[in-house]
Amino acid sequence: MSCRITYQDVRFSYPDGTQALRGVNFALEHGEHVALLGPNGAGKSTVMLLANGVLLPNSGQIHIGERLLAPENLREIRQQVGLVFQDPDDQLFMTSVYDDVAFGPLNQGISGDELDRRVTAALDEVGLVDVSNKAPQNLSFGQRKRAALATILVMQPEFLILDEPTSNLDPRGRRQMMALLASIQTTVLIATHDLDLAWQLCQRALIIDEGVIVADGPCHELLQDNSLLQAHGLK
């Protein structure tokens, strides 16, 4: 099966009439780490929510591998595409970190030793094995961010979509998150205002503004184009 995500002339408007995407085209190739950059309201969050079917396009097509993003394929697509929200409290709701990470696999019918192996591996990957029995609300914000990531990594997605993974982190938490993201081997799309993160972690960048991809190229080249960045609310 093809391991790429493609957006073909994707358009989306919200019920209040806000036109969020006006014909978006791009493809993510297997193994790429790509930054999605743009000012507030540019369409970044909409691109992300479309990737695993939280939203469906008004027109155009999105393919995840060889599957068309459509209601009948959402179960399979959500197993392929993991979405990590900006606010970890949107993803943590159980009484312990372990139970939060176990929730997804349990709903796939995984149990027993295999469940414990996968949960422990995901917690180890984000450095949280030692707090697995704690309640999420008793963790630091940085730990909660990493716990939310573990709830997605445990599902072993082919594609990982992250919304502002370093936002509101202190310098130590930011360094930990950066190191963690650098170690991830799967295809990653990171929506961020953190241009240093994009510079360090992403080989490629997409710049979106007013619902259109206005630039797509090597991250270091785009981030050194000051006139491009200023024209689209980035600095």
Image (cartoon, rainbow, N blue to C red):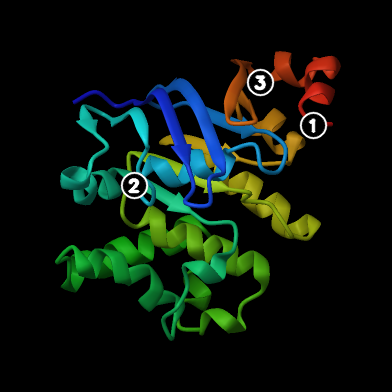
- Marks 1 and 2 sit apart, C-alpha to C-alpha, by 28 Å
**Residue in front for this viewpoint, 123 or 36:** 36
Position in image of residue 193 (x %, y %): 72, 41
User: Considering only order in the chain, which callout, 2 or 1, is on the residue closer to the N terminus?
Assistant: 2
| Number of residues whose C-alpha sits closer than 10 Å to that of mark 3, classed few (under 14), some (14–19) or many (20 or more) | many
Residue under numbered circle 2:
53
| Number of residues whose C-alpha sits closer than 10 Å to that of mark 1, classed few (under 14), some (14–19) or many (20 or more) | some
Q: Mark 3 against mark 2, which lies toward the viewer?
A: 2
Q: Residue at x 73, y 41 (%)?
A: 194
Where, quadrant-wise, is the N terminus in this rendering? top left
Number of numbered discs: 3
**Residue in front for this viewpoint, 207 or 89:** 207
What amino acid is at disc 2?
Answer: Gly
What amino acid is at disc 3?
Answer: Cys
**Residue in front for this viewpoint, 151 or 118:** 151
Q: Residue at x 47, y 55 (%)?
A: 125
Q: Residue at x 39, y 40 (%)?
A: 51
Residue under numbered circle 1:
234
What amino acid is at disc 1?
Answer: Leu
Residue 184 visible, this orientation: no
- Marks 1 and 3 sit apart, C-alpha to C-alpha, by 13 Å
Checking the image for residue 219, the label placed there is 3
Q: Are marks 3 and 2 in contact (CB under 8 Å)?
A: no
Position in image of residue 90 (x %, y %): 51, 68
Position in image of residue 32 (x %, y %): 47, 26
Residue 234, by quadrant, is top right
Q: Mark 1 against mark 3, which lies toward the viewer?
A: 1
- Marks 3 and 2 sit apart, C-alpha to C-alpha, by 27 Å
